């Protein structure tokens, strides 16, 4: 026989089989925390970043590391969504979405990289 417990506080539950909380207080506390952690606007940003990452990963996995900015735009890549920047020793700015990023050259070409280490390659070795 399995004893059910309150999702919020762990108190053993007595009563209806579909009961998840021991009290309204626990239910409210749980729901407030759930909705507070990731708001809808945060979720949209995270989705956009994940989409960007998936696009970059797709090119890199098919060994297309040098593409035009136009090509990337055509995939629906959102250039406004960036997780962080990385500047290498040549002062080239890489724009990352999680572990994938790219550097943009003046002639409209982008060089894609899969992490910070790769972004550093091509510079003078230490
Ligand atoms: Zn409880």
Image (cartoon, rainbow, N blue to C red):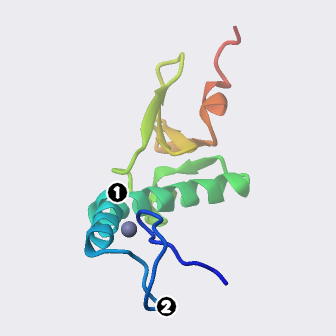
Q: Residue at x 37, y 75 (%)?
A: 22
Nearer to the camera, 30 or 47: 30
Say what secondary structure mark 2 lies in.
loop
Picture quarter with ligand 1:
bottom left
Q: Mark 1 points at which residue?
A: 37
Q: Is residue 93 shown left or right of residue 59? A: left
Q: Which residue is drawn at 31% across and 74% down?
A: 23
Q: How crowded is mark 2: few (under 14 residues within 10 Å), some or many (20 or more)?
A: few
**Is residue 74 something that shows in the picture?**
yes
**Residue 75 coordinates in the image, percent (x, y):** 49, 65
Which quadrant of the figure contains the N terminus?
Answer: bottom right
Question: What is the quadrant of the C terminus in the image?
Answer: top right
Q: Which of 39 and 4 is in front in this view?
A: 4
Q: Name the residue under label 2.
A: 17
Q: Which of marks 1 and 2 is in front?
A: 2
Residue 124 found in image quarter: top right
Residue 100 image offset from top left, x and y in percent: 57, 45
Q: Residue at x 49, y 59 (%)?
A: 50
Report the Cα–Cα distance between label 1 and label 2: 28 Å
Badge 1 density bin: few <14, some 14–19, many ≥20, Cα 10 Å: few
Instruction: Determine whether label 1 and label 2 are within 8 Å by CB.
Output: no
Give x and y (percent) for residue 70: 46, 57
């Amino acid at each position: 026989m399995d004893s059910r417990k309150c999702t919020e506080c762990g108190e053993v539950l007595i009563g209806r089989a579909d009961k998840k909380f021991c009290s309204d207080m626990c239910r409210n506390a749980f729901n407030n925390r759930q909705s507070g952690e990731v708001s809808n606007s945060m979720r949209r940003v995270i989705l956009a970043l994940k989409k960007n990452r998936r696009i970059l990963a797709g090119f890199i996995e098919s060994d297309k590391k040098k593409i035009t900015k136009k090509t990337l735009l055509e995939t629906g890549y959102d250039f406004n969504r960036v997780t962080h920047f990385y500047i290498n020793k040549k002062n080239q700015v890489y724009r990352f979405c999680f572990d994938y990023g790219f550097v943009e050259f003046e002639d409209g070409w982008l060089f894609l990289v899969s992490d910070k280490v790769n972004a550093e390659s091509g510079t003078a070795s230490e």
